[in-house]
Image: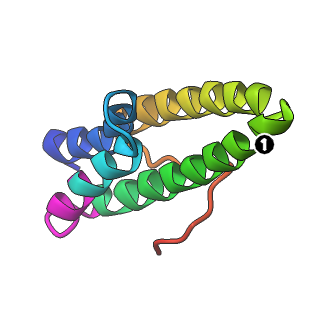
Amino acid sequence: MTTDEKNWGMYCHLAAFAGLLIPFGNVIGPLIIWLIKKDEYPHVDAEGKESVNFQITVAIAVMVAGALSVVLIGVPLLIAIVIFAVIFVIKAIMETNEGRSYRYPYNLRLIK
């Protein structure tokens, strides 16, 4: 595996932080990188799918927690979701930077 392939695999996970700037950027960022580089690098194809699937899972969880915030249980859930998502994304970035594949533990694998 080349350094370029490792880096693009890492960028798939790193792009999830675009959600801090753009609504649904956490899904759009990894999706764009995956779509552009998936045919060029097999590692990026695998990591991109994993990242996009995880970010879709996070987006669904955030929407459910947002709806539950009306009942006040959603606020602690939102905080927990954000903390866990950041931890898992950082772990994925570190693993893929080393050239290893990362599988998120809580992930709806919608894109196969």
| Residue indicated by mark 1 | 68
Vertical position of residue 69 compared to residue 44: above or below? above
- Residue 65 visible? The answer is yes
The x, y position of residue 47, in whole percent, is: 38, 54
For the residue pair 4 and 16, the one nearer the viewer reads as 16
Q: Magenta region: which residues?
A: 33-42
Instruction: Judge whether 58 appears above or below 45 on screen.
Output: above
- 13 lies above or below 34: above
Where residue 13 appears, as percent x and y from the top left, is: 38, 40
- Left or right placement of residue 62 versus residue 72 in this view: left
User: Which amino acid type is marked by label 1?
Assistant: Leu
Asked which secondary structure carries label 1, the reply is helix
- Who's the residue at 17% across and 59% down the image? 37
Looking at the rendering, which quadrant does residue 69 occupy?
top right
* The magenta stretch spans residue 31: no
Q: Main secondary structure of the magenta part?
A: helix
**Residue under the image location 86 percent in, 37 percent down:** 71
Which image quadrant is residue 48 in? Answer: bottom left
Left or right of 81 in this view: 25? left
The image's colouring method is rainbow
Instruction: List x then y, in percent, for residue 86.
Output: 54, 27
